[in-house]
Image (cartoon, helix red, strand yellow):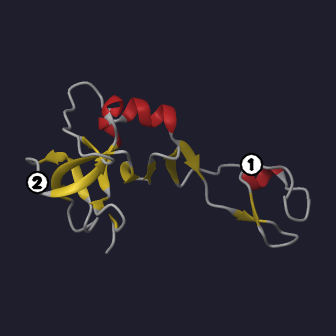
Amino acid sequence: MTNYDEETRIHYGVIHCQHVIEMWMEKSIDVYENEKCKECGKEIVPFSSTCENCKAEIEEDVWEGIEPIGHEYWNGKYLMTAGDNMDVFVIKSPYYTWCRPCSSCTPNAGYIIDQTEEGEGIKTYCPGPRWYEDGVKVRMWKVENGE
């Protein structure tokens, strides 16, 4: 099943970054498409000056105009990603909520802002209480004990 954690039986969550913008901008890092070394063909770390594999020098113009292809945040408790449309996908979290499913664009994931009563809708990972902008209300429970 896609967009679902088989181990915890919790669906991935989706929330637009405007609802978590301050924390998302502070915590997430840019993700870049990996370039390949012209000498050995292995992927090179973005903005590096030498290839870690063969130690070949990387020309600076390789990185000119490069834009991130997305953003992510991972700290051992949370795993969240976002692409160009800036919807944040919550793939792992110590918290969950009950909400309605997303549209068919993201099958089987929950739309965090579209809250339902406990036990209705789908059980969905969500960011913790400190993540939300003022005025955004999300009821949540801890994954470890349901409280």
The amino acid type found where label 1 is placed reads: Phe
Q: Which of 15 and 141 is in front in this view?
A: 141
Instruction: Give the residue at mark 1.
Output: 47
Image spot of residue 21 (x, y percent): 38, 34
The amino acid type found where label 2 is placed reads: Gly
* Residue that extends furthest to the front in the rendered view of this protein: 145
Residue drawn where x is 85% and y is 56% of the image? 58
* Residue that extends furthest to the top in the rendered view of this protein: 134
Q: Are marks 1 and 2 in contact (CB under 8 Å)?
A: no
The circle drawn on residue 107 is none
Q: Does residue 37 appear left or right of residue 13 in this picture?
A: right
The circle drawn on residue 119 is 2
Q: Which of 7 and 73 is in front in this view?
A: 7
Q: Distance between the residues labelled 1 and 2?
A: 47 Å
Image spot of residue 64 (x, y percent): 71, 49
Q: Does residue 28 appear left or right of residue 61 in this picture?
A: left
* Mark 1, secondary structure of its residue: loop
Q: Which of marks 1 and 2 is in front?
A: 2
Q: Which of 89 and 5 is in front in this view?
A: 5
The quarter of the picture where the C terminus appears is top left
Q: Does residue 30 appear left or right of residue 22 in this picture?
A: right
Counting residues from the N terminus, which is met first, the one under dot 1 or under dot 2?
Answer: 1
* Mark 2, secondary structure of its residue: loop
Compared to residue 79, the image places residue 22 above or below, namely above
Q: Does residue 67 appear left or right of residue 20 in this picture?
A: right
Residue drawn where x is 84% and y is 50% of the image? 49
Image spot of residue 66 (x, y percent): 64, 51
